[in-house]
Image: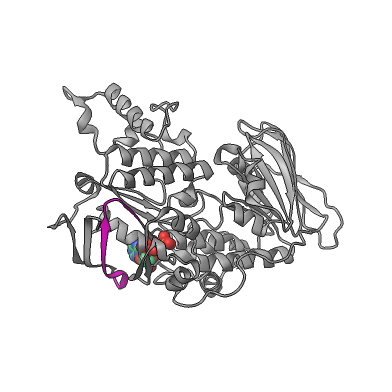
Amino acid sequence: MDKQVFLETKQISKKFNDVTAVNQVSMNVKLGEIRGLIGENGSGKSTISAMMSGLLSVTSGEMRIDGATYRPKDTLDAREHKISMIVQETGTIPELSIAENMFLGEEQRFVKRGFVDYKRMNQEAERALELIELRELDVTRPMYTLGFEQRKLIEIARALYYDPTLFIVDETTTALSHEGRVLIHQIMRRLRDQNKAVLFISHDLSELMDVCDVLTVMRDGELITSIEKQDFDENHIKQSMVGRVIEGNYYRVDYDGSYDDQVMIRVRNVSSSVLKDIQLDLHKGEILGIGGLSGSGMHELGKLLYGGLKPVKGEVLVYENKEDGTSAIPRKLKSIKAAMASGIGYVSKDRDKETLIMEASIKDNLVLSALDQLSHFGLILPGEEKRFALRQIEGLKIKASSMNQNVGELSGGNKQKVSFGKWIGNHSKILILDSPTRGVDVGVKTTMYQLLYTLKKEGYSILMISEELPELIGMSDRILMMKDGRICKEFSRAENLSEAMLIEHMI
Ligand SMILES: Nc1ncnc2c1ncn2[C@@H]1O[C@H](COP(=O)(O)OP(=O)(O)OP(=O)(O)O)[C@@H](O)[C@H]1O
């Protein structure tokens, strides 16, 4: 039986000044179906979903729901039409409570005799959280007390609370840990089985092939093809995305796993509110992978090594990079400033809040961490800045109208490239990378992996925190698995290392 169309786009386009983000796309979003949207960074996926969910207006073309023109004024209007979306980055206000965030802009619903009835608002927030089986959370807690993943889960609950007929998930799963992903997959399948429509944007092809009934491929703002589940073929999908055959290896191909004896960072008996008795050495020329569930303490470990988290007990020691291999006197890491001065770079998982300045240009974001390197006797020549920024933009294929474009205007994956390029380019010899390839398309991921391998060979020390197990296995010399704030298992690089072996020490 043919599935019923819920939302129809007819030749819709979106222009931002001279950039055409979406070009004449016609698509049918159907009930009882999970549709995946895939394409390289900047191919227009988020822009399409933003038009559907009332975040952006349509430049030309038309959308229809049940045959009637649909032109949402804003997200509230879209919600009235039963369309809800989870966006890439968290759209919450840190100082407000979970409940207040959940009903932001909807406070009128709870007004009684001129006052907001917070008791009822809190009860409804609890009801929303029950939809995703989050029962223990106190809804009066301010949002800033929650971790990145929990904030995402709150957004999911908020979207589901309004019982959407079309549920749009934009690149959310890469922000989630293994458990969070399982949960959102279950939610999408449940909605599909209730004859609702789901639009799912992701860069994880195997995830899309598993969860979706149909996949729509975008390239340069255009719809290239739609493929039904029975015709899914990984290579064919990749080729449609990039318009050419992808060649070369994805991860490094050696199983050598060796590195220099020289220690660059030593963590000694560190405990904090989350971390428990952490001991580790990061060596010169090593890629050290850190895996675990999101609450395992691995993200806190990243912050610790960048001076952004003070240990309650123990210490972090940074060793000077001695070219002749002799051991240097270590210095105790005390602050972010000291970390930067010691040549430590850090890519945060929460890139929009912690790594990038949205209102500044791509060039300024890229150059910021390399000021020392670019200055000659305290002076920075504009030409130097430009050359530096251009190298990163070209190397990482950052898609933008110019290097002066604000980072806030870039697509999610392109923001991630800027946050990566910022540290790679400034010759920080120690890189702490938390989920570095999050939201980045396959082509650029390949470039990033090759770059990391080259840096390792050049003697850089890289600590890579990741929720993507294939990435950890594919790139690390050693992997430390974390659970409940502790390091619970160490693996060395080996051909027979499998995801199942790692998962055993995560849960
Ligand atoms: N506000 C804006 N101003 C100018 N250009 C924009 C704006 N928003 C998006 N764009 C541009 O539109 C194009 C499509 O972006 P979009 O975010 O839809 O891509 P995407 O396919 O979702 O990418 P990603 O996989 O990286 O999230 C990009 O070139 C982007 O830079």
Q: Is residue 313 above or below residue 226?
A: above
Residue 410 visible in the displayed image? no
Residue depicted at 25% across the width and 56% down the height? 1
Nearest to the observer: residue 4 or residue 248: 4
**Taking 205 as reference, is 201 left or right?**
left
- Please give the name of the residue rendered at 66% of the width and 35% of the height, measured from the top-left corner: 311
Q: Nearer the viewer, residue 416 or 424?
A: 416
In the rendered structure, which segment of residues is drawn in magenta? 17-34
- 61 or 247: which is nearer to us? 247
Residue placed most toward the observer, 378 or 409: 409
Q: Main secondary structure of the magenta part?
A: strand
Query: Residue 176 at x, y = what percent?
Result: 49, 46
Q: Position of residue 26 (x, y in %)?
A: 25, 67
**In the rendered view, would you say 399 is above or below 439?**
below
Image point 60% across, 55% down: which residue? 470
The question of residue 167 being in magenta is answered with no
Q: Position of residue 488 (x, y in %)?
A: 70, 38
The colour style of the image is one colour
Relative to 322, 179 lies left or right = left
Q: Quadrant of the C terminus?
A: top right
Q: Position of residue 83 (x, y in %)?
A: 25, 48
